[in-house]
């Protein structure tokens, strides 16, 4: 029977379903008018949420025991939580390559990665708009750059490196170790992704970069030395190796040109070593028209006399 004007029926029929809002998505871009991230305290709280989400993803990717152990050491106090999280993520990215943890992210996690990238963009915009340059903002930028390089998100790491070096470093200097690390990333981005060796050398000279591995990479690219390039790539840390991936196709094609001009035939194992690519991928991705005969690759046949 209807009870017009009476009390609403109890139970689930009289309740609105609660909406679950992602805390990373609930905040908007400062450039679009959301001013919450201009507040320093909110920036720190938001950064804490970003790092917690990242650590949760890493745990899902198969490093649960180690991450749980390190998270257990975090301070409960809200004042110290951001600093503790930063120490945790710094130790993780130093002790184990970030790509080991992110390797477990499949297609089902692409949305999560996209959410993280957007959240870091919001935080960076807030830091830039508030003209903040202190220990927190630098550590936030360092985290954003490292993660963005690992997922090869150029739109995130490239402007972040430029702001870190050209704006923040001039106001609140980086340590020498930090400066060398991020100058190296900028140099490798210029050389490997942008194919601008002249600018890469100029930046190296301007900041006084002293990194033998980066120097070797520049020499390899300058002289088309594919053997040196692959050797160095196997010896550098995960983030430098990620940036080197941008030049892999160019180096592989150069190696193939050298093989084509120099040999009539070559054994399959040697070709795969020089190009750092399997025969199947060479034929599929580089349109190699050579013939495989047993374990030998026939590049061209000598002209009959």
Image (cartoon, grey):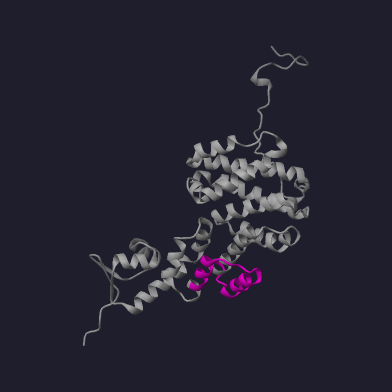
Quick one: 149 or 16, which is closer to the camera?
Answer: 149
Q: From the viewer's perspective, is 143 left or right of 222?
A: right
Residue at image coords 49%, 42%: 61
Displayed quadrant of residue 198: bottom right
Query: In percent of the image, x 50 and y 43: which residue is there?
Result: 108
Question: Measured from the top left, where is residue 176 in percent x and y?
Answer: 65, 60
Q: Residue furthest top?
A: 1
The stretch of residues the image draws in magenta is: 193-219
**Residue at far bottom of view:** 305
Figure quadrant of residue 78: top right
Q: Position of residue 273 (x, y in %)?
A: 36, 65
Query: Which quadrant is home to the C terminus?
Result: bottom left
Image height of 200 relative to 64, above or below: below
Q: Main secondary structure of the magenta part?
A: helix
Does the stretch in magenta take in 199?
yes
| Badge count | 0
- Asked if residue 154 lies in the magenta stretch, the reply is no
Residue at 53% of width from left, 60% of height from top? 240
Residue 25 visible to the viewer: no
Q: In the rendering, at what x and y percent does residue 51 appear?
A: 62, 43
Q: Is residue 128 visible?
A: yes
Front-most of residues 239 and 195: 239
232 with respect to 76 (left or right):
left
The quarter in which the N terminus is drawn is top right
Residue 194: percent from the left, percent from the top? 57, 68
Question: In this view of the protein, which residue sits in the foreground, 47 or 89?
Answer: 89
Q: Residue at x 76, y 43 (%)?
A: 41
């Amino acid at each position: 029977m209807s009870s017009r004007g009476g009390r609403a029926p109890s139970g689930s029929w009289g309740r609105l379903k609660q909406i679950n809002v992602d805390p990373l998505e609930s905040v908007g871009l400062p450039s679009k008018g959301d001013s919450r991230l201009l507040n320093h305290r909110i920036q720190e709280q938001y950064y804490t949420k970003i790092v917690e989400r990242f650590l949760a993803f890493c745990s899902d990717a198969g490093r649960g025991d180690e991450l749980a152990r390190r998270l257990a050491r975090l301070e409960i106090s809200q004042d110290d939580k951001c600093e503790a999280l930063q120490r945790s993520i710094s130790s993780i990215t130093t002790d184990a390559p970030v790509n080991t943890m992110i390797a477990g992210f499949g297609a089902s996690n692409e949305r999560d990665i996209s959410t993280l990238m957007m959240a870091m963009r919001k935080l960076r915009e807030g830091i830039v708009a508030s003209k903040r340059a202190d220990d927190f903002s630098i550590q936030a930028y360092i985290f954003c750059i490292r993660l963005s390089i690992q997922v090869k998100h150029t739109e995130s790491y490239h402007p972040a490196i430029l702001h870190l070096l050209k704006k923040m470093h001039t106001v609140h200097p980086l340590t020498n170790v930090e400066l060398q690390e991020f100058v190296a990333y900028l140099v490798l981005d210029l050389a490997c992704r942008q194919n601008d060796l002249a600018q890469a050398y100029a930046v190296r000279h301007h900041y006084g970069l002293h990194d033998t591995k980066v120097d070797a990479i520049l020499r390899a690219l300058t002289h088309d030395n594919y053997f040196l390039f692959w050797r160095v790539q196997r010896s550098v840390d995960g983030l430098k190796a990620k940036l080197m991936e941008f030049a892999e196709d160019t180096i592989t094609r150069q190696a193939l040109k050298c093989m084509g001009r120099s040999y009539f035939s070559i054994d399959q194992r040697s070709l795969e070593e020089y190009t750092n690519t399997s025969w199947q991928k060479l034929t599929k991705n580089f349109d190699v028209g050579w013939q495989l005969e047993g374990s030998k690759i026939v590049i061209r046949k000598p002209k009959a006399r």
